[in-house]
Image: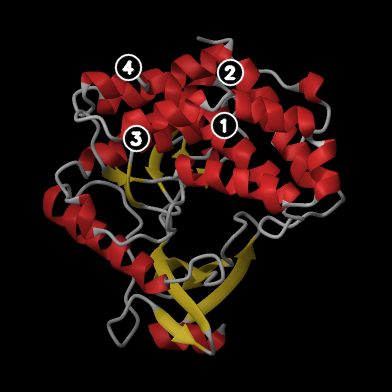
Amino acid sequence: MENIFKLFGWNVVNYEKLSQGLINNTYTVNTLSGEYIIQTINHHVFKDPKAIDHNINTISQYLLNTNPNYKFSHLVPALNGLTLIEWEGKYYRAFQKIQGYALSVLENENQAFEAASQFGKFTRFLTNLNADELKITLPDFHNLSLRYQQFLQALDQGNINRIQAASDAINFLKSNYSIVVKYEHFIHHSEVYKRVTHHDTKISNVLFNKETGQEKAICVIDLDTVMAGYFISDIGDMCRTCLCNVSEEEVNLDLLKVDAQKWTAIKTGYLSQMDQVLSNFEKEHLFFGGQFMIYMQALRFLTDHLNMDNYYGAKYEGQNKVRALNQIRLLELYNQLS
């Protein structure tokens, strides 16, 4: 790390590795000139780190021109002027540290409202930025049609014993194919638009503070998945990750509960920013966003289970089946809110 610090010209007082975050290694660095965040980019997950760098810089410049007071994690250039540094086979980038804290678990409706409002504001402030200027950092990331085809392929080519043992889950996912049909109708509708979309709207990707005495969301972070997309990705991922009282790893499905008040808070918070941006047809599909995302993740987990865990991996036998059953139950509970 000392060699990396020299590339930025920092006189470092101290630094420490942060535990939060699953994909990239993240460090907080205290220097004589200020505090920074430095990250490695996991180029095994993100095959094109330069695309991420391009996207963040494109958004950064647009916001500086149009909303310079918007709180955004702008990249810090190294001494050579570049914001992406390759060193010994790894990629590094730095941000000015924004004072705030991230939550690992959503605790109440106010947090849900605040987070949804910030994700909505992020897209709203970038409405006039041509989303096609951004590069694709994860191809087909939220392409439900592709995920269903991969699921069918796993039924044809996957492990026969696992296929037989997962027959109930397989039948459930097949019986809900109408979600795929609705998704395809949605994305091809004339009143549906691609916009700058975050794509990873879990609660830990929003910074909060309490400077006013009340807990407020102040900005979104973790921009590696930002690219052109549909709003259902953002509101859907909030529903999938924020409405349930337990994680996707929970084995005891009887413990799963979905909080209707948090759903109302997410919807209200998101629309507080996006009501004038979304078309009427899009607003009619707010609830569908949750169905789409939860169903897609159930598909992905079960597909990986049938393919012998070659994508997500597994810490124990059947972990991805557990995750799939968890998401299936979550979808059943979520549908009861409608």
Image quadrant assignment for residue 103? top right
Question: Where is mark 4, residue-wise?
Answer: 284
Query: Residue 211 vs residue 157: left or right?
Result: left
- Residue at x-position 46% and y-position 14%: 264
Mark 2 to mark 4 CA distance (whole Å): 17 Å
Residue 40: x and y in percent read 52, 72
Q: Amino acid at mark 4?
A: Glu
Which numbered circle lies on residue 231?
3
Whichever of labels 2 and 4 marks the residue nearer the N terminus, that label is 4
Q: Are marks 2 and 1 in contact (CB under 8 Å)?
A: yes
The x, y position of residue 180, in whole percent, is 47, 31
Task: Identify the mark at residue 334; answer none if there is no mark.
Answer: 2
Residue 119 position by quadrant: top left
Percent position (x, y) of residue 92?
Answer: 47, 76
Judge from the rendering whether residue 80 lies leftward or rightward of residue 116; answer left or right: left
Distance of label 2 from label 1 (alpha carbons):
9 Å
First in sequence: mark 1 vs mark 3 = 3
- Say which amino acid is labelled 3: Phe
Q: Please give the name of the residue rendered at 81% of the width and 48% of the height, measured from the top-left corner.
A: 160
Kind of element beneath mark 1: helix
Which dot marks residue 274? Answer: none
Quarter of the image that includes the N terminus: bottom right
Return the x and y of residue 328 as percentages of the image width and height: 67, 27
Q: Sequence order check: which comes first, mark 2 or mark 1?
A: 1
The residue wearing badge 1 is 294
| Number of callouts | 4
Between marks 1 and 4, how big is the CA–CA gap? 18 Å
Residue at the (66%, 58%) spot, across then down:
311
Asked if marks 3 and 2 touch (Cβ < 8 Å), the reply is: no
